[in-house]
Image (spheres, rainbow, N blue to C red):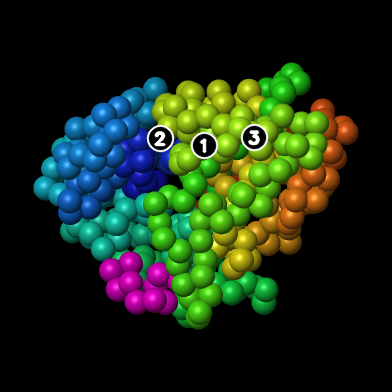
Amino acid sequence: MTIIFSGTIGQSGLGGQAWASLQYLIGLRELGHDVIYLEDSGEEAMSYNWEKEEWVDDIKYPSAYVHRCLEPFGFGNQWHYRGGDQHAGMSLEDFAARCAKADLMIIRAIPLWVWRKEYSLPRRSIFIDVDPGFTQMNIAAGDKGLAEGIRRCDRLFTIGQNIGAPDSTIPTNGWNWIKTLPPVALSQWPMTTGEATHFTSVLRWDHGFDNSEYKGAKYGQKNLEFPKFFSLPKRTNQKFRVAINGPLIPSEHGWESISGEIVTQTISSYREFIQQSRAEFGVAKHGYVQMRSGWFSDRSVCYLASGKPVLVQDTGIESHIPLGEGMLTFRDLDGAIAGVEKINSNYQRHCRAARQLAEDHFATGKVLPALLEDALD
């Protein structure tokens, strides 16, 4: 098939976001499909230039970042970047021709309220919700642009495994949300060996977003959850390192904190940071936890594939993925301490189990065929 896949590689300018799209691009190509990457930064063409630390309104910087990320994997001429009336990569004419031949358009991230005529050309389109709970709340709160864009799609998917469950407060808005998991291209994330020293995390403090509100309850970002675990390093003998986009954690808590912008500047530096870790310690957005979304991170699957155990905050995922070896969840500080001790008590066993979880549940060869089957059914 010919597939158009949209993401946010250039707009984010960060390796983690780039890998979130690359997993799909590489995985779909490994399945034998012809894949074209699309990115649209909207009517104002705004993006953040990390090198100059300033906002820019032209597409030169983000489109160059897209090229740097895609070219090593053979997608050097298989992408199209739009922003306002600017474009880069594949010509408008060639992109429109590919859209006309496309069997499927996968919308993981474009401003759905900016719907250009080419986006209606593929035979079918699907939307993948990667911010479960916040997406649905925004629609329920009256975001007409988002709702209109989503209605253009033939199928709606979400990585929120618990949406629709009795214990989840996420509104479905009367739509059918098909569950999917974040994929990982095992060919690009080999298992690594050795006894690394630090449990690590990569996080954005608050994404620059305010708290959201739904039915009188407020739902926030990671800045509302992470402080609950500030004392973790002093409660264990384990070392912790966090790469953070936001204020560095004060050193008196025992955390080693470094700039997330530096760690995730390239796809290589992001992968190296994860593969040089002992395990992941992951805190979720406050909203994911409170809404019982069943969210699971596209970053955590990279740890798993690398043979790194993950210890992540409970969002309701336990009913959908086997836990206990390779992957553990926690709800409070005591649970986090117990998780650290359990992983370290039989570390190599948890490493092998982590890789096995990636192979059994998150590999592109598992996730993407199911996604395509549901998309084209």
Q: Which residue is mark 3?
A: 252
Residue 88 among those drawn in magenta = no
Callout 2–callout 3 Cβ contact below 8 Å: no
Q: Please state which amino acid type lies under the numbered disc 1.
A: Leu
Q: In this orientation, which residue lies closer to the viewer: 44 or 28? A: 44
Q: Which residue is mark 1?
A: 248
Q: Residue at x 39, y 76 (%)?
A: 141
Q: Residues within 10 Å of mark 3 (few under 14, many from 20)?
A: few
Q: CA distance from mark 1 to mark 2?
A: 18 Å
Q: Residue at x 72, y 23 (%)?
A: 197
Callout 1 secondary element: loop
Q: Residues within 10 Å of mark 1 (few under 14, many from 20)?
A: some
N-terminal-most mark, 1 or 2: 2
Which disc number belongs to residue 14?
A: 2
Q: In this orientation, which residue lies closer to the viewer: 136 or 71? A: 136
Magenta stretch: give its range. Answer: 137-146
Residue 263 visible to the viewer? yes
Q: In this orientation, which residue lies closer to the viewer: 9 or 243? A: 243
Callout 3 secondary element: helix
Which disc number belongs to residue 337?
A: none
Q: Which residue is outermost to the top?
A: 194
Callout 2 secondary element: loop
Q: Residue at x 56, y 56 (%)?
A: 224
Q: Is residue 331 left or right of residue 62?
A: right
Q: Residue at x 68, y 22 (%)?
A: 192
Rendered location of residue 28, percent (x, y): 47, 41
Q: Is residue 10 left or right of residue 377?
A: left
